[in-house]
Image (cartoon, helix red, strand yellow):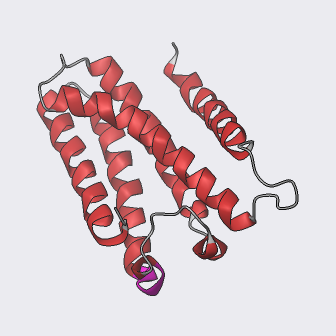
Amino acid sequence: MNLINVPALLRGALVAAVAVAASAPVRADAPPSRADQLVTYRKALYQAVAWNVRPMGGMASGKAPYDAKEFALRAGNVAELAPMLAESYAPESKAASGSKLKPEAWTNRADFDAKLKDLVDRSAALAATAKGTDADATKKAFFALTDTCKSCHDKYKAD
């Protein structure tokens, strides 16, 4: 697959995933609220991020053979997805059902937004590093990304 086509394919797959999730049965008299649609979109984005992070995690931890081309593809995908997350945290999503976001994300919005920006920055750095030939540097950038994920999950995600 040509890497240039990956973002378009990724966006297409994400749109399909959101469409499927949004078509889940709801009461006929109550279409999904804007808040619930935002959470559905957010969950689809995170599922796509996880889909790409898992194989990189296996390679970075030595549980799977390191494949530089595959790693670069996955890192590029995450770098494309990460900036999309911010719009899914629109203020009206605060009232959504089914969200695992702690209320502290809304009361500490500046810190939460800074963590989202760190995710975007680290995913971009990982994608750039993964284009090179230094596997150790790529793994280090991967673990910096996952540390960023963990710091936000620890503070703002309910179990």
Residue 6 x/y as whole percent: 55, 26
Q: Is residue 5 left or right of residue 118?
A: right
Relative depth, front residue between 108 and 104 = 104
User: Where the C terminus falls, by quadrant?
Assistant: bottom left
In this rendering, would 101 be left or right of 135? Answer: right
Residue 72 visible in this rendered orientation of the protein: yes
Q: Residue extending furthest top?
A: 1
Residue occupying the point 17% across, 36% down: 139
Q: In front here: 99 or 108?
A: 99
- Measured as percent of width and height from the top left, residue 1 is found at 51, 12
Whether 20 is drawn above or below 71: the answer is below
Q: Position of residue 57 (x, y in %)?
A: 23, 34
Range of the magenta residues? 106-110
Residue at 31% in and 26% down: 71
In the picture, measured across the screen, residue 154 lies left or right of residue 74, that is left
- Residue 113 counted in the magenta span: no
Work out which residue is located at the far right of the displayed protein and give it: 29
Dominant SS type (magenta): helix
Q: At 66% from the left edge and 42% from the top edge, which residue is drawn?
A: 21
Q: Answer yes or no: is residue 131 visible.
A: no
Identify which residue is drawn at 20% across, 26% down: 59
Q: Residue furthest bottom?
A: 107
Q: Residue 101 falls in which quadrant of the image? A: bottom left
x and y percentages locating residue 11 in the rendered image = 63, 36
Total numbered circles: 0
In the picture provided, is 116 more to the left or to the right than 38? left
